[in-house]
Amino acid sequence: NYMSQKTFTVPNISCGHCTHTIEMELGELSGVRTVSADIDTRQVTVAWGLVSCRSDSESRFIQVMKSMWISSSQRSAAP
């Protein structure tokens, strides 16, 4: 039940607003200790306080990313 960390690649990060929004939205999730988004590497590192919280937060992370950035190819492929 120690702290767990994972880094995600988010190709659509393009500005400070993106990183701020990611950090604010994910930082509010249960169990999340820290969130760090980087424009240059287009990566987001999330640290959870308890490993048991990671699964729910990781699923929510993916939902947040999908709702914030759907690539144009995914949008055009939608019915």
Image (cartoon, rainbow, N blue to C red):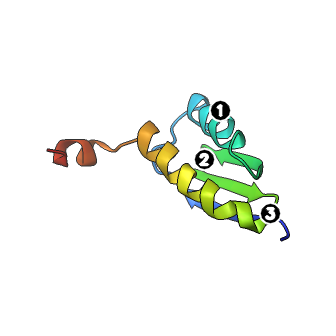
Task: From the viewer's perspective, tell me whether residue 76 is left or right of residue 28.
Answer: left
Q: Quick one: which residue is furthest to the right in this view?
A: 2
Q: Mark 3: which secondary structure? A: loop
Q: Earlier in the sequence, mark 3 or mark 2?
A: 2
* Residue pointed to by mark 3: 50
Give me the C-alpha separation between circle 3 and circle 2.
Answer: 29 Å
For disc 1, the neighbor class at 10 Å (few under 14, some 14 to 19, many from 20) is: some
In the displayed structure, would residue 48 be above or below residue 30?
below
Tag in front: 3 or 2? 3
- At mark 1, the secondary structure is helix
Q: Which residue is mark 2?
A: 40
* Mark in front: 1 vs 3: 3
Amino acid type assigned to the residue bearing label 3 in the image: Leu
Would you call the spot at circle 3 few (<14 residues within 10 Å), some (14-19), or many (20 or more)? some
Query: In the rendered view of the protein, which quadrant contains the N terminus?
Result: bottom right
Circles 3 and 2 in contact, beta carbons < 8 Å:
no
What's the CA distance linking mark 1 and mark 3?
A: 24 Å
Quadrant of the drawing holding the C terminus: top left
Name the disc covering residue 20, or none.
1
SS at mark 2 in the image: loop
Question: The residue under label 2 is which amino acid type?
Answer: Asp
**N-terminal of the two: label 2 or label 1?**
1
Few, some or many C-alpha atoms within 10 Å of disc 2 (few <14, some 14-19, many ≥20)? few
